[in-house]
Image (tube, rainbow, N blue to C red):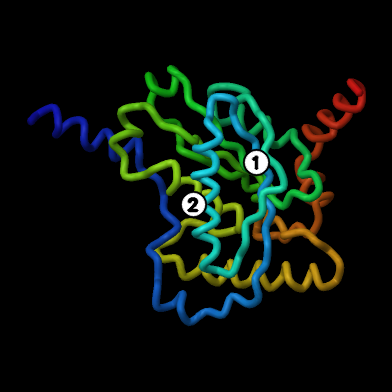
Amino acid sequence: MRFYIIIIPFIIILSGCSTLGLPQQDKLKQIDFGAPETIRFCILKDDRVAQAKVDELIEAIRLELSQYALNMDIPWVRPWKRPGFWIKDIHADLAARPLEEPCDRLLAFAGTSAGDFILGAQTYGSVETTSRTKGFVFAEWYSLVELLSFYSPQSVAVHESYHLLGCKHGVTMEACYDQLKRIKAITAKQRKAGNDFFPGIGEDDQLLLSRDEVNNKFGSRLRATIKSNQQTH
């Protein structure tokens, strides 16, 4: 009994993740999200993650977004190797990758290692706040803390997809619903004007209306990568 008294708070502390808020079904039913729009997620798949698992996570996101008349398209899935153990290593790798056409978002599905099992969860997934166009999710979990948590790779993939649309943590989902309606309306207006890009959302909720604007936000890290790629071709 003493073991459980000690370990349960430990698990809750380490596995705790801020939520986007409680769903508000009554509010959701009252909102007109407009005509269907499409957002294109380009996928990086860690070599250690099975394609079947990636398909499962993509389907969870697709199902979630469909309730907002938002379609998820996958232009491509490319092989990728997790660049390091720490979260900062993954974010640095994604930051150095240009958001290329036709991608609206770049989402990496990372595998786990023995180090993850030994040290427990660092986090289950994360989205950068420079543009909210790039993020990652750990596709498979193996540590004790993770296995006993209240989350799953599917729920985390859905959670991070909301962040990629500009939703923030809150008490309820009401503010997120408003954000989704807003960003969809802006996207529709942009596409009608000939700009086929689902906008990114930078710091202070600044809209990034093109891939060039997104890529410029990442500055020297991205320019160095582009220069290196040009030199190797």
Q: Identify the amino acid type marked 1.
A: Ile
* Residue at the extreme front: 52
Q: Secondary structure at mark 1?
A: strand
Q: Secondary structure at mark 2?
A: helix
Coordinates of residue 207 in the picture (x, y in percent): 72, 61
Instruction: Return the mark for residue 113.
Output: none
Task: Tell me the residue at 70%/55% (across/down).
Answer: 200
**Front residue of this view, candidates 196 and 91:** 196
Quarter of the C terminus within the rendering: top right
According to the picture, the residue beneath numbered tag 1 turns out to be: 43
Coordinates of residue 64 in the picture (x, y in percent): 50, 59
Task: Tell me the residue at 52%/51% (across/down).
Answer: 59
Q: Identify the amino acid type marked 2.
A: Ala
Quarter of the N terminus within the rendering: top left
Question: Disc 2, disc 1: CB below 8 Å?
Answer: no
Coordinates of residue 208 in the picture (x, y in percent): 75, 57
Q: Is residue 210 left or right of residue 65?
A: right
